[in-house]
Image (cartoon, coloured by chain):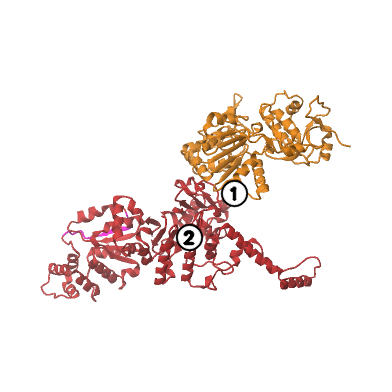
Chain colours: A orange, B red
Amino acid sequence: MNNNKLIIAAAGSGKTTLLINKAMEIKNGKVLFTTYTDNNAGEIKQKFISEYKYIPKFITIQTWFSFLIKHGAKPYQGSYNEQMFGYDIKGLKLVNEKSGYKIDKNDKPIIVNKHRLYWPEQDIKKHFFDIRDRIFSDKLSKFVFKANKSSDNKVINRIARIYTHIFIDEAQDLAGYDLEIVKLLLNTNSTIILVADPRQTTYSTHQESKYKKYADGKIKDFFLEKCKKLIDIDEDSLEVSYRNNQEICNFSSALYPEFPKSKPWACCRDNTGTYNGVWLVQKKDVELYSYQDKYNSVILRWDKKKKSSNTLRPAFNFGESKGKTFEGVLIYPTKEMEKWIFDHRTELKNKTRAKFYVAITRAKYSAAIVVNDGVRINGSPDLKIWTPRK
Amino acid sequence: MSYIEKVKITNYKCFKEFSFELKKGMNIIVGNNESGKSTILEAIHLALSGLLNGKYLKNELSQYIFNKETEKNYLSSLKEGTPQPPPTISIEVFFDNNDFPEFEGNGSSDKEACGFLLKIDFNDEYNEDYEELIKTKKVATIPIEYYKITWISFARENISIKSIPIKSVLIDSASTRFQNGSDVYISKIIKDDLTVKESVELSQAYRKTKESFMEEESIKMINEKVTKNAGFSTKKIEISIDLSPKNSWENALMTYFDDIPFHQIGKGEQCLIKTNLALAHEKTKGSNLILMEEPENHLSHTKLNQFIKNIEDKLKDKQIIITTHSNFIANKLGLKNLILLNDKKAVAFASLEKETKETKETYEYFKKLPGYDTLRMILCKKAILVEGRSDELIIQRAFMDKNEGMLPIEKEIDVISVEGLAFERFLYIAKMIKKSVAVVTDNDKNYNKKIEDKYTKYKQYPSIEIFADERNEFHTLELQIADANKENLKLLCDVLKIDSNKQTEESIADYMKRNKTKCALNIFDAKEKILYPEYISKAIDWCK
């Protein structure tokens, strides 16, 4: 076999580092290193530089979307449909809702029986592209899949002849037709290695109903059910968190009781100073906390566009922060998250749970969560309410 | 080894639409002057290197690189109210194999292929400016100031010149120099063969030399003096060496040959050295294409021999395109490598071998002929095909009589005698390359069958003309000449140096038939002018 592998492990367990080290060991090959977000792609580049000083020529780091446009859509776009031969795909249109709906002359969606009307697939240009010739993010992988099919697998063959190795970081974000493409790649001579943390499924840019049942972190089931013989699944080799200390590991593991608990690495465990751990910071104390905080905590929130009381700190929204490591974080939870802190039986939507998990696990030493004034903790040993030092 | 399999040129200089195939190893483009040989090399080199006349195209873009007819059509379309978009130049380069999957896709004009194109087209970002320009109604040229130059792989990806896996070396007669006088192409040839490591080392070493100049005690003293005299107490004024990137080693270093600057040595020597250096290139990835323009121009006959031998020995895994109008070179380097170029049409000689039965016969026929004869038809302006040596002499003379004693060849008209009536073999090539060719022939006693029927398929090719007499009773050239001169048999006899007594048309024709060559020579050498049959006169008129 060609050593295809899916490695499942928790946040901070060194998934990305593992891929980087594997990539550097490769002789006589070409590596595609891909991941979902721009931020994480940047993070990977940064890690290469800090570990090895440079990114070797044989390694290409590219987001999943740019990879799909460059090597998936464009080369054989003409095979999908005759009218695509001379078409100039001008990039990606990121969408958060199902794309390609019909609009009236005022650019408003046409609504019939409370539902939007959508362009069918036969209207290729309107189904797949916006008015500025950009391909919709939720349909890109579908387009690639179809172009590959109508070109007799030429798209996939071409990719496999360019890249001997394809490494996919944050593979839990793959969904719908993405999975089909990965499956096709598994059938080639290239070695495919995916790393995933099902707990961190924060993106769902795919509105297509395809493979809905594998969404929300069920990526392992997809491989087990659809291509078991093509890939090994490894859930054991990375079980230690190199990033988070004991308290953070405990807290984040509580979000996913069905998964094995994350264990902090020896060095993180030692680092349990006065300032470390998970803190609840009351709103009234946030300013003071920020002032006394020795880690220059980064702000993490649902939507960074919302006004923050602390505009001087760098801020990320939860999804964006994935793949990053900070010494300390200051989390603005959603209402549901805040409820959950005090009662773990609170229902959380999959996406909300995943984002909270991502946020907590960004911190090496200190994760502070902003809560309403006057909260109480009833015998929860992992929680501490932060009090200003004199 | 990878090579270029095909090149398609659209709207570039003399080529409105032009496509031709290349093969591995040697390719020789043979064509008359003005047939576009150099433009082909120039276009290929431009696509592979971005250089035009040794300078970057982006600085050299002008409307003159557009096809004249295309420009005219565009401009008149604006005037006549049937506007067309500003024209696009494209040069498509097709690779032969699967070594470069990144260049594969169906973005070529041939749909699925491996390669890339250089595209010079209107930049949409200037739509607004263009609109204003059109409104002024004063568009006199192609608005190249709104154009962009891009390289795009057949996978529809914008690429950089650096990423093109085949590097080209142009060896031409024009010399292009850097500001310091050193030859652009010799530097490029040397540079292309350097590994990444070597080229980093070279530029580092060059940088160090510059820096050590500043460390020189005398330079320091001079700078102190300059600073002091300038009268500023806190700021320095210094002379220094330009360390900006534009002043890199290529612009400053010079190549020497036996201590003589390269551009000062003889052209022939330059050509040999460049060729040898290019042939010696060893790239692990990618490969080299050598483009050579008319090597006969600056090499003596002996040097040419040496040069050809060199190429043959070292060519192995390289591709080379040579343009020439020298029979000698084309012949020496082999008929199978020829690409015949005429009137913007190119035909690879070897391609004839694999096509139809007819092309195969043509190929076999020319393979047996001495190469010289094949090329004569390609290299002249117009050709007259005749049936034998004596016919050839008579046509030559007929031509001279009507052209103040000038030989046909002086007007680039070649009279070729074709043995065994193999006209059709020549005509086959002529129709493919649109060559003007006339056949002057006997009617073989059956004009309808031997001329009308046989040649009727060429009627659709205006460049091909058949000249023969309709009268079946005059079925040889001798009978025709006797007939044409029947009013003055005495003169004809004098020219033929025979006794005119009791001669009839028939007896003279008979004598001529028995002494073909002698008679033809006599007619050719004679002071007096005889009369010629009408179909020959017409053929001579056709030459104009």
Residues at marks 1 and 2 on the same chain: yes
The subunit carrying tag 1 is B
Residue type indicated by callout 1: Glu
Disc assigned to residue B513: none
- Element class at badge 1: helix
- Number of marks: 2
The subunit carrying tag 2 is B
Residue projecting furthest to the right = A390
Q: Dot 2 surroundings within 10 Å: few (below 14), some, or many (20 or more)? A: some
Magenta stretch, residue numbers: B461-472
Our reading of the magenta stretch's main secondary structure is loop
**Marks 1 and 2, Cα distance to the nearest angstrom?**
29 Å
Q: Is residue B326 above or below residue A2?
A: below
Disc assigned to residue B125: 1
- Left or right position of B390 against B4: left
- Left or right position of B239 against B303: right
Image coords of residue B69 (percent x, y): 45, 56
Where does label 2 land, which residue? B42
Q: Where, by quadrant of the figure, is residue B417 drawn?
A: bottom left
Quarter of the figure with the C terminus of chain B: bottom left
* Foreground residue among B106 and A29: A29
Image coords of residue B319 (percent x, y): 44, 58
Residue type indicated by callout 2: Glu
* Residue under the point 48% across and 38% down: A153
Image coords of residue B40 (percent x, y): 45, 59
Front tag of 1 and 2: 2
Q: In this view, does B465 lie above or below B522?
A: above
